[in-house]
Image: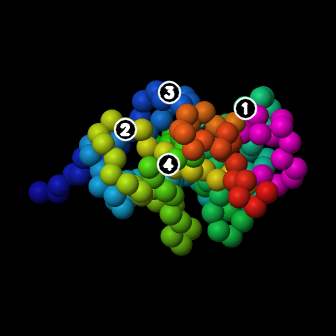
């Protein structure tokens, strides 16, 4: 008989933003939790699809090697609902053009899952840009933005 594995995660409303993904059971460090899937498109196509209006940016894109993007809006897995944190308990690992979410530490049942989006913004990082990509993770280490400012 085929054994079906119980999922390690579920989706529900998050205190950080919209919906989020939560641990359905205790998860050990270093475990693969879910693959970030969706339609693989070029950055040019992603730019056309990206709605940049509004004060707060909202994206389901995941940038991968080869100048490509996974668009989680199209046939995407529930990984597209994982929110960003500046003190994450998960990381996104790219392997041959596929992206998997792994636990970075022990995660308790019903804890929300987060990875650090480290979004790259091409262009000048102004106050307006920082506001648009503001982070509401609430962690002590919060850098205030979902953007990667490490080389700024
Ligand atoms: C892949 S979606 C995550 C799911 C989202 N919560 C939803 O319900 O659609 C990514 C978007 O969620 C929002 N988001 C995720 N983490 C955030 C955070 N720490 N602070 C502020 N907004 C966040 C941003 O708008 C971001 O572009
Ligand atoms: Zn933060």
Residue that numbered label 4 is attached to? 88
| Badge number at residue 22 | none
Asked which secondary structure carries label 2, the reply is: loop
Residue that numbered label 2 is attached to? 111
Residue that numbered label 3 is attached to? 15
Asked which secondary structure carries label 3, the reply is: loop
Residue 11, horizontal then vertical, whole percent: 41, 35
For mark 1, does the 10 Å Cα neighbourhood hold few (<14), some (14 to 19), or many (20 or more) residues?
some
Distance between mark 3 and mark 2 Cα atoms: 11 Å
- Can you tell me whether the CB of the residue at mark 4 lies under 8 Å from the nearest atom of ligand 2? no
**Of callouts 3 and 2, which one flags the residue occurring earlier in the amino acid sequence?**
3
Question: Which mark lies nearer to you, 1 or 2?
Answer: 2
Is 9 within the magenta?
Answer: no
Single out the residue that lies furthest toward the front.
Answer: 140
Residue that numbered label 1 is attached to? 56
**Of callouts 4 and 1, which one flags the residue occurring earlier in the amino acid sequence?**
1
Q: In this view, does 47 lie to the left or right of 64?
A: right
For mark 4, does the 10 Å Cα neighbourhood hold few (<14), some (14 to 19), or many (20 or more) residues?
some
Disc 2 vs disc 4: Cβ atoms closer than 8 Å? no
* Camera-nearest residue between 40 and 86: 86
């Amino acid at each position: 008989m085929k054994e079906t594995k119980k999922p390690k995660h579920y989706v529900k409303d998050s205190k950080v933003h919209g919906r989020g993904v939560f641990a359905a059971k205790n998860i050990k460090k270093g475990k693969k939790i879910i693959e970030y899937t969706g339609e693989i498109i070029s950055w040019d196509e992603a730019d056309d699809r990206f709605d940049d209006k509004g004060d707060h940016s909202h994206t389901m894109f995941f940038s991968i090697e080869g100048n490509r993007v996974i668009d989680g809006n199209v046939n995407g897995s529930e990984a597209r609902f994982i929110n960003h944190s500046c003190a994450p308990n998960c990381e996104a690992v790219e392997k041959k053009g596929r992206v998997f979410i792994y636990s970075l530490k022990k995660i308790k049942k019903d804890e929300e899952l987060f990875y650090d989006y480290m979004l790259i913004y091409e262009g000048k990082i102004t106050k307006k840009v920082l506001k648009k990509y503001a982070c509401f993770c609430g962690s002590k280490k919060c850098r205030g933005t979902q953007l990667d400012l490490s080389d700024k």
